[in-house]
Amino acid sequence: MRTLEELIAAANCNTNFEITSANFPGADHAIFSDQLEVIDFGTGLGIQEVVKIIKGRGFRPATIFEGFDFAARNPEAQRESNIVIPEEFSIRGVNVVLFFGADFNHGRLVDLTFSDTWCSKIYDKVGLLHTPCKIRDKFLVSRI
């Protein structure tokens, strides 16, 4: 099995410096599936909603390992639309989700963005009307 850093190199994407084995412990022992699918719900949904729906349909969120493997084998997919791994990760106490997308030079990138849980905490903290973040991207999942 390859390390996360080896998969990142194989995917050949500009990758956020926070995406390392140190920040994603256990990624080196991740499940690998060849039954990955990209699902488009066609509307903005929060991560919690997406996870509930996909599990009800017999899927699970793809692992970070599967995400980089998918990016290496399907380099054009992320240029068409951002592809999100529908799972929250905590980096330095901040909940984030990982996505594969295109950068401004039409290259490929892998980055982190705030999850709806993080947005909820901020809205609550500053006393604003609670409006969870909605992600309008496609989601990488695997058959259970």
Image (cartoon, rainbow, N blue to C red):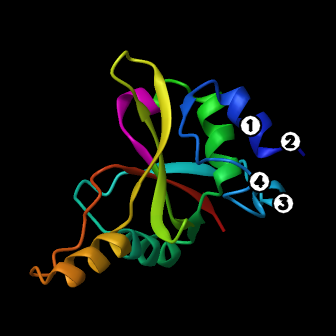
For marks 4 and 2, the one nearer the N-term is: 2
Q: Residue at x 35, y 36 (%)?
A: 81
Q: Residue at x 47, y 31 (%)?
A: 77
For marks 4 and 1, the one nearer the N-term is: 1
* Relative side of 31 to 50, left or right: right
Q: Position of residue 128 (x, y in %)?
A: 10, 79
* Circle 3: element type: helix
In the image, is residue 14 above or below residue 115?
Answer: above
* Residue receiving disc 1: 7
Tell me the number on the disc at residue 102. Answer: none
Residue 134, located in which quarter of the rendered image?
bottom left
* Residue receiving disc 2: 2
In the image, is residue 39 above or below residue 92?
Answer: above
Q: Residues under labels 3 and 1: Cα distance? A: 13 Å
* Relative side of 124 to 31, left or right: left
Q: Which residues are magenta?
A: 78-83
- Is the C-beta separation of discs 4 and 2 under 8 Å? no
Tell me the number on the disc at residue 29. Answer: 3
Q: Give neighbour class at mark 2: few <14, some 14-19, many 20+ (Cα, 10 Å).
A: few
Q: Residues under labels 4 and 2: Cα distance? A: 11 Å
Give the foreground label among 4 and 3: 3
